[in-house]
Image (spheres, grey):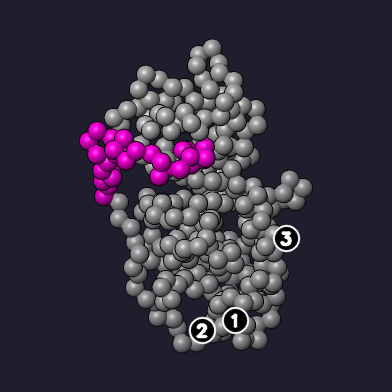
Amino acid sequence: MSIIDEVRAIVPRGNISGQGWHNFNCPSCGDSRGRGGVLFTEDGFIYRCFDGGCTYNLRNLGWRKGGCFGRRQKEWFQLMGGDVRDLPIKEVQGDKGYQAPKDNIPTFTEFKTFSMPDNWQILWDSDNEDVKQYLMDKTNGAVQSSNILYDPSDPSCYIVPFTHKKEVVGYVKRDITARKGEKRMNGYAPPQYMAGQDRIFDKGYKYLIVVESPLDAMMLKTVGVRSNVLTKSQVKLLRMSRMTIVMVPDYNRKEAAGFIKVAQENDWYLSAPFSKDIRFKDIGDVIKYGGMLFTIERILAERTKRLVLMK
């Protein structure tokens, strides 16, 4: 069977408009009003969702004979219930054969180790009850099993070590008494480093949750990008993961814009697990309110590709 035959076989039978659109529920955005549509042309097809905010409304999908049936087309084909192994390989490659687009964007997977000061120690082995209690309250108790450090010369701070391949490559120090400014947070990290980025290549998991905060990433055992704006190198590295990416921005609209833009450009999920009744400003507040399991369940339950800016 040809690609067109395979696509025709997975398109649900139903309403066909006067213009020739085969209409059905879009599998990407949770549509239930038949706003997804395939239009077959003389040598290919076009897919579009007419639900504003869906990734297939913001950017149509299409294919024509002789062209490459690429990553985005394959993802849509699988969403529709198709098996890419059924597609004829010669048509998938296109007339000139498929060649991965070249770019000069580097990826960073090797970092120099960081030598920690000798006086740093595991927080839970210290007698600093104020910082311990702060973290217990902030993380709903989950932080107690983590490798948080403590500097006796800086008693109002806790330290989150940055690790890569089981080696420490940097850290962030957070002062629990400071609300803003350099005193509130300082540290060192290699350029382009993402907290927990080893997990990008984990096997056996379906989803990779991406957050901003290194502490939240440590709690959720996922990736923290340390900023609300991702670099091209970081995006390229995330795209190498075999897992489904779920971006979790902060609640603030301006701070969320960077995550939303990256999710839209890469056809990734976005999740905003924030209650309408309780004012959460970020994922850390959700963890504080309900704990780890509650937070992960909320993130996955609220994932969507209807990428509309939050207010």
Alpha-carbon span between mark 3 and mark 1:
23 Å
Image: magenta residue range: 76-104
User: Which tag, 3 or 1, sits closer to the chain's start?
Assistant: 1
Q: Residue 289 bears which disc, if any?
A: 3
Indicate the quadrant where residue 147 lies.
Answer: bottom right
User: Which tag, 2 or 3, sits closer to the chain's start?
Assistant: 2
Element type where label 2 sits in the image: loop
Near-viewer residue (36 or 90): 90
Alpha-carbon span between mark 2 and mark 3:
30 Å
Q: Which residue is mark 2?
A: 120
Element type where label 3 sits in the image: helix
| Residue at 52% from the left image edge and 60% from the top image edge | 205
| Residue 249 place in picture, x, y as percent | 56, 50
Indicate the quadrant where residue 122 lies.
Answer: bottom right
Q: Which residue is mark 1?
A: 123
Q: Residue 186 bears which disc, if any?
A: none
| Residue 28 place in picture, x, y as percent | 55, 38
167 relative position to 184: left or right: left
189 relative position to 31: left or right: left
Q: Residues within 10 Å of mark 1 (few under 14, many from 20)?
A: many
